[in-house]
Image (tube, coloured by chain):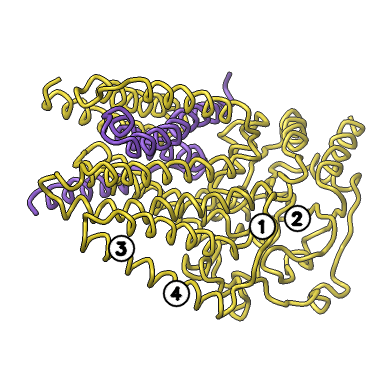
Amino acid sequence: MPEGVVNGAYLVAATLFILGLRGLASVRGARRGNALSSLGMLVAIVVTLLDHKIIGFELVAIGLGVGAALGAVLAVRVHMTAMPQLVAAFNGFGGGASALVAGSAIASGTVMTAATELQAVAAGAVSGLVGALTFAGSAVAWGKLQEVLRWQPGNTSLQHGVNAALGVATLALFALVIIDVSLQWPFWALVAAAAILGVRLTLPIGGADMPVVIALLNSASGLAAAATGFVLSNNVLIIGGALVGASGFILTTLMSRAMNRSVLSVLFGTLGPTEGGPGDEIYEGRIKRTSHEETALLLRDARSVMIVPGYGLAVAQAQHAVRDLSAELERRGVEVKFAIHPVAGRMPGHMNVLLAEADVPYEQLFDLEQLVGTFAQTDVALVIGANDVVNPLAREDPTSPIYGMPILDVDKAHTVVVIKRSLSPGFAGIPNSLFAAPNTAMLFGDGEDAVRQLIGELKATG
Amino acid sequence: MEVFILALTVFLLAAFIGFEVITKVPPTLHTPLMSGANAISGISIVGAIIAAGAQQTALAAALGLAALILATVNVVGGFLVTHRMLSMFRSRKK
């Protein structure tokens, strides 16, 4: 096949990727967008197979067959609650693949015959470094999210020192790869060092910070693919990789802003859970308890109800119960909305997927920006399993570790009911002044159980 | 050097398009965005196919095969799971 045709087809593929991502601008266009991206990938694969560079098809057939079967099984069987693990694993696979392609180009010597030797070798080193880092870091992230890996070393200055030394060694190896392109071992040593660094950087990161880490690894997997594109002088890899790199970068920024943390402090752990104490002085004599019956009456007589789900809801698998409660209230003419904070789940947008799976229509899901000013017009806010993201201290107390974090202004609703097991603090480890507010009542208990009881009480009132 | 600048140009332009397009994705679709973008990063499958099929050295081919399996899992799994998620988003109007 003439090179012009091949490159033309790659251009078509790259265009389809962009159109596909653009489709995600609305829920309605999203499925078509995903189909366009998939089509772009198919075009790229088919034209590569038809290209004259392919001599033996056995290995290609095996690779495609095994990979497709494995990918399909993983995609079809995964539970929506386990989506962060799956995306972490896929990030790692993408990074690993890019590093291996670069390794193969270096092992075969195609890099050395390239007209642009230095570019190809340097890009190969970048691809190997970023790809291996992504692969290893993603493996650790997967282990943590899947809860098979519970070990979390502290972020001591000794650890930082070791990591810094590793970083220097990695850079030295990087230089070595470029200086003498005929040597192969520096590349593999570089890959190994990057992998160790990936593990060591991800291990100390706690579960609450995982949304940032996954987004960052997502970005890295794109950059690794783009670097591989520089090795092979292939534009579709460069464009596809750049798009993913940009996407991951945006999500990383959004997530760290939503958590009031910088990416650096997530990576190097300058802020752990602080010892805020049990918060007795805030709570003392100010906590009001309520009952299921009272809450049910309150909800029944409300015109508008805002449900604020947090990660605790997903843990309790209460999203289906919440959907039933929402449907029961709507049947009675109550307007129900869901207020979703960016870090309500374990990855960006995770809570939205969990609620969509439970058949909550997407028109009912509202994000931070859409919710500005709406709580003041809400009769009842029902908080289920959310804590730090509804803490007014983020707005009011400049000494608080979460000061400045964007929160849902739940306290501005006319009445607030918080369903929670106890007054225990959230990830930030600080008391929540919302619980002690005069317009707040606590409904202590398990999330799903409480919601089911509320539905029962509502039905009993006729 | 010229080739490198050309490649860098393509990279930067694509990154800018990426920023423009992706800032318009609503937060409700951020998980499908991530898994869909992730599938696109499996584009290194193109390099993997060449590496596995070009029959240069045995080591290069073996590395190519490993890369191809990883990339294919990423591509097929990524697009499929994104489709699955997007199919769950239902409108109020039936």
Instruction: State which tag comes first along the sequence, 3 or 4.
Output: 4
**Kind of residue sitting beneath label 4:** Ala
**Kind of residue sitting beneath label 1:** Val
Q: At 54% from the left edge and 64% from the top edge, which residue is drawn? A: A200
Badge 2 and badge 4 both on one subunit: yes
Instruction: State which tag comes first along the sequence, 1 or 2.
Output: 1
* Left or right of residue A376, residue A42 in this image: left
Number of the front mark, 1 or 3: 3
Label 1 with label 2: CB-CB less than 8 Å: yes
**Mark 1 falls on what kind of element?**
helix
The part of the image, by quadrant, that contains residue A276 is: bottom right
A19 or A325, nearer to the observer? A19
Number of the front mark, 3 or 4: 3
Residue denoted by label 4: A164
Identify the subunit bearing mark 1: A
Residue A410: give its label. 1
- Chain B's colour is purple
Instruction: State which tag comes first along the sequence, 1 or 3.
Output: 3
**Mark 3 falls on what kind of element?**
helix
Mark 3 and mark 4: span between their CA atoms? Answer: 15 Å
**Kind of residue sitting beneath label 2:** Val
Q: Is residue A277 above or below residue A423?
A: below
Badge 3 and badge 4 both on one subunit: yes
Residue denoted by label 3: A174
Instruction: State which tag comes first along the sequence, 2 or 4.
Output: 4
- Residue A11: where, in percent of width, then height? 20, 31
Number of the front mark, 1 or 4: 4
Mark 1 and mark 3: span between their CA atoms? Answer: 51 Å
- Residue A334: where, in percent of width, then height? 71, 36
Residue denoted by label 2: A416
Q: At 87% from the left edge and 54% from the top edge, which residue is drawn? A: A444
Label 1 with label 4: CB-CB less than 8 Å: no
